[in-house]
Amino acid sequence: MARTLFQKVWDLHRVRTLSNGQTQLYIGLHLVHEVTSPQAFAELRDRGWRVRAPERTFATLDHIVPTQAQVRPFLDVMAESMTEALERNCREFGIPLFDLASGRQGIVHVIGPEMGLTQPGMTIACGDSHTSTHGAFGAIAFGIGTSQVRDVLASQCLAMTPLKVRRIEVTGRLASGVYAKDVILTIIGRLGVKGGNGHAYEYAGEVVDRMTMDERMTICNMSIEGGARIGYVNPDETTFQYLEGRPYAPTGADFERAKTWWRGLASDPGAPWDDIVVLDGSKITPTVTWGINPGQSVGVDDRLPEPGAAPAGERAGLAEALEFMDFRAGQPIAGTKIDVAFLGSCTNGRISDLREAAKVVAGHKVSPHVRALVVPGSQSVAKAAEREGLDEVFRQAGFEWRGAGCSMCLAMNPDRLQGREVCASSSNRNFKGRQGSPMGRTLLMSPAMVAAAAVAGEVVDVRSWMAEPAGAHA
């Protein structure tokens, strides 16, 4: 019988069906960071429990780690305290920790794939909602809360309810200047921020088939912003080429055997998807959020919606967003003045993101009224960028070049908006207060669009910049 990848991987990790109908699911890989794990480790210690499978558990520092001055002890007392707690817990429970001295530290959803820890067919859990990122490899990956972090540490299992599977096919070919970020913002805009509730999203179609692994990670990363706890792409040659040679990936004959098995996990033709949605990729344009959730977005050459023209159930939310953002219905998003430009996050902090942004920035200067920073997703991304001279491109343009971490995506460290600042951001959430200031305003967009906005000092269409010589917008 034909099955989806989700059904195959779920069944392979099913320990038993519980009396309430949930599945006791074995977790193949557990990723841990400094913010959602301290209480979980404390409960293990209080009960005299050990970590059930330390060889399947890996830790890093990302959420609260400073990105400007990373000399220990940190000036931020909370950051230092949480870092010390994670170091102590990893030593006591025998868990590998990729700390600042390791050369492999970074955002948990960046370092897992780049080290080959993330592989097709796995079940992956982490105390962070953007764990869906790892689904780009054909894994079933999802975020969990602190109590579930405890459960996985203690038992390597979770009680989970099976999900429906929605296949989202993006057909055609993306135009120049349109990126994976525009694709996922368009999907969320069409299906809504709650449209994926109770579903896993399976991304497919010619556009997804042509995407690099970095691009697939971007769309899977934001599945949760559309309500889908899990997003995945069926593994293919692009997946295998990315994994080959990674430190934790199989090698030699084992890799070849793994490829055969991984290939067999892909959804079968005619699999019983619960729903199929088709989007024409050729019609997607550079997309910018204008509101207070990732579903409130428009094409860069479009105008903001009129609440009165929306379905009755959406009008209050649209009006609230317009008021908070100081926007008017019907105004264009292009030309919106920005104060801050942020390049980074688990959504768009990889080397390919920095390359695309650097192409736009090269030969230009950041607008005098804009504070701009680049925060690589990992130490490995930073090193790769520095080998290519990208750090100098950004510095010469006026960007700050920082150490790896989550930074201004969620502002748990000093990287924060101030007051009513408007930020062009390559991150994943634009909720009220997300970037540190309760009144700060976030416009989500692709890294190339952020770079163009940094130079122009306002939201612009990066497609027009890509056709012009360097210096034309200086």
Image: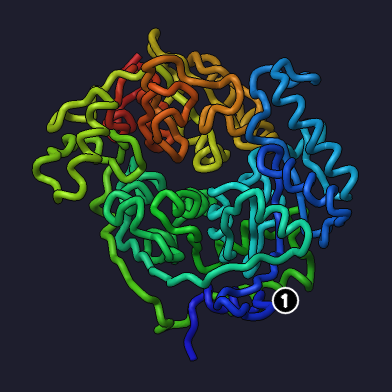
**Residue 174 in sight from this viewpoint:** no
- What scheme was used to colour the molecule? rainbow
The vertical placement of 305 against 195, above or below, is above
Q: Residues within 10 Å of mark 1 (few under 14, many from 20)?
A: few
The answer to which quarter of the image holds residue 449 is top left
Residue at the image point whose x is 17% and y is 42% from the top = 315
The residue most toward the left is 309
Quadrant position of residue 469: top left
Residue nearest the observer in this picture, 220 or 254: 220
- Residue denoted by label 1: 257
Question: Residue 453's spot in the image, x, y percent?
Answer: 35, 24
Say above or below: 307 vs 188.
above
Q: Is residue 245 above or below residue 411?
A: below
Residue 401 % position (x, y): 59, 21
State which quarter of the image contains the C terminus.
top left
- Residue farthest along the top direction in this orientation: 368
Residue shown at 54% from the left, 25% from the top: 374
Image side of residue 75 versus residue 205, left or right: right
Residue 89 visible: yes
Q: Is mark 1 on a helix, strand or loop?
A: helix
Say which quarter of the image contains residue 17: bottom right
* Residue 222 in picture, x, y percent from top left: 45, 49
The front one of 36 and 331 is 36
Query: Residue sitting at 32 percent across and 32 percent down?
Result: 462
Q: In this view, does 4 lie to the left or right of 197?
A: right
Q: How many marks?
A: 1
**Is 149 displayed left or right of 233 in the figure?**
right
User: What residue is drawn where x is 33% and y is 44%?
Assistant: 176
Furthest residue in direction bottom, as rendered: 1
Q: What residue type is labelled 1?
A: Arg
